[in-house]
Image (tube, helix red, strand yellow):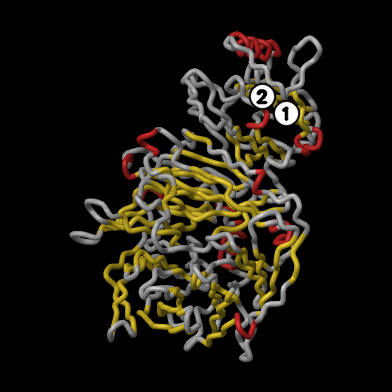
Amino acid sequence: MSKNVPKYTVPIKPVRTLINSKFEGYKLKVFDEKSHLIHFQLPLPAITIPKIPTNLKLSYKEIQSRIHFNHLFKGFEINKGKGICFYFDSENFVILAEYDPETSKVVTHRLLKIQQTSDYSGNVEENSSHHLYPNYPSLRALSPNLLLVTNGSGIIFLVQINNNDNVSTYSGEILYQIEFQGHSQLKQGSGLNDIPCVLLDGKIIVDEHPHILFLVYNTVLDPISSESTKETRKVLFDVSLLQLSMSPQYEMKIIHVIRGPEIPFYCNIEFNGTGYVIGSNMEYEVVYKSSTQNENIKPMDIDDDQITGEQEEKSTNRVSPYIWTQTSSDVTICFQLPKGTPKTAIHCNFSQTHLSLTINLDDNPNVSPGQPPIPCYAFTRLFDLIDPSVSLWTIEPTIGLLTLHLEKHNHNTRWSHVFQHDDGVFETLDPNEFAEFRERLEKFTSDPIQDTNEQSDQSGAFKPLQHLIGHETEESIDFEGKSSVFMWFEREGDLIAKSSGNEYLCRQFEWCENVEISNNISLLPSVCLKSDVDGTVYSIGHPIDSSKLDVSPLVITHIATFNAFAFVQASKREKRFMFHDPKYRFVIILEGDHRAFVYKRHEGREKHDEQSVVELTASTSGDPEIIGVQMASIENAHVIILKSNSLFIIKLL
């Protein structure tokens, strides 16, 4: 299994000028439903969403993914100005819904029926040996006339949309279909043929040999689970990058597979096909590469709540990433950083069970072979419980010495290693080794850096800053929720860049039209992260010439702020979907089965913004669930919402 040692650590930094400290709250504005809310009754009900049986052995993460699965899929414009979305109806037909913002009318077209090999409600035989249940069908638009579709049971379809009767109606045609079977090296003798999978993203890559790149995820049973623990059904998730050639004949192959304990909340392929960005609460490890298929690849050994830190090869001549020692009541860890590293570059936080430590250095210094790597631990589980309220860290910039002091929760408990999963760093038992470590740092620091912002005594000697972990500045990571991790994987499967940020809130609505390029950076969908009470929006970009210029292929920039959004969304206990506008004009929360909360955003430092509540009810009964949402018209800020028997259009401008 490939180790995760990215070349670049990408900082996620809020821009203070984009934070409105004068904001006081939202004022309710009555929503005009007569002129700004349109109801459209579906000819046939949308996909049936069954209740999850109590005897179904799904993990919590699988259940959550089904509850929040978006059954409405964005499409490319076919006729200029008209929004396109797709959904599956109750008879497994792919439905194209075309919305005209000028007439406020929706027209639906049944394209084709997708073959179902099993019931995606999860009704399988109780004595099934593999317990991998079908998923909901999923769809990605590749172009105005090409779709990639999965039936949720392991079959992938390439579908062409045909115009009939002079563009008045549409139909669908299957050009190619194939069973997704994963990679043979990862099957572990399960006896599975088709593996249920869900589409994450797909792009047509136009080069000398045009092809389709797409990403799917599927569930994998934890290979370390024994017979006695099968009832708990620990699961992992594989994310596979696949290539489907388009000429001279269709052929699909797996390029690489990464594995982790979470379903990603963000996944986008760069338009040139050089790589992709994946976002999750935990990290992923490469478990298969087609370019190194002769490697002896082992299954990932990871628990549901574990996330590995940076791990070096366990060899006798490796450079240890840190040194550590302990007493009966505390643990001390020392990291060597580049000299002159300021305190503002260090983001360190503890929970009772986990450590998070990232070093944000703007110039991304190259670490020489004889030096330890820059530490990067994104919510990594510790060996035992600690007391975060009295734990602290110190930094000595002149020699680049970062020291963590962890107070043990269970005194007199001896730690065999720092983290729950042994990274091979043995305890330093001799106190003299710590003194020698410090002397080595001072020896190789010829030009002490005087930082006017640091504390010093009257003699000018440096006095280490002490900063309580539980009282970090506003730039630190908030772990009331989980921190987010964004990773850039190259097409071949190499992890090149990684970034850790605050808790993930939502992403922007899908935008299928032309790729946006700014300053030679191709922009991917933005995300909204928690920052104190606000929701800070970050653009995610890829420098097109990053490989030639030797710069990070991942750029994350704070571009907008939704005032107090982190606070208001926390009060919504039945959230189904949250998205923000690609132009940052509003953010929307769909709660329960009939209500939408809309929070407007204005430029500047106003004390108040507008909030609206939209009731999604119709005169007809039997339409209880909100099962999907997209933007019907980005230019006009029209949102389309899918319920079991109807579509609603909310006009926000």
Q: Report whether 596 appears left or right of 263.
A: right
The residue identified by callout 2 is 402
The residue identified by callout 1 is 393
Rendered view: 562 above or below 639: above
CA neighbours of label 2 inside 10 A, class few (<14), some (14 to 19), many (20+): many
Q: Is residue 287 visible?
A: no
* Residue at image coords 63%, 13%: 448
Q: Quadrant of the N terminus?
A: top left
Residue 267 vs residue 601, the one in the foreground: 601
The percent coordinates of residue 76 (x first, y second) are: 39, 68
* Residue at image coords 32%, 71%: 145
* Residue at image coords 52%, 63%: 509
- Earlier in the chain: of badge 2 and badge 1, it is 1
For the residue marked with disc 2, what is the amino acid?
Leu
Real-space CA distance between mark 2 and mark 1, rounded to the nearest whole angstrom? 7 Å
The percent coordinates of residue 87 (x first, y second) are: 46, 75
Mark 2 and 1 residues: CB-CB less than 8 Å, in contact? yes
For the residue marked with disc 1, what is the amino acid?
Trp
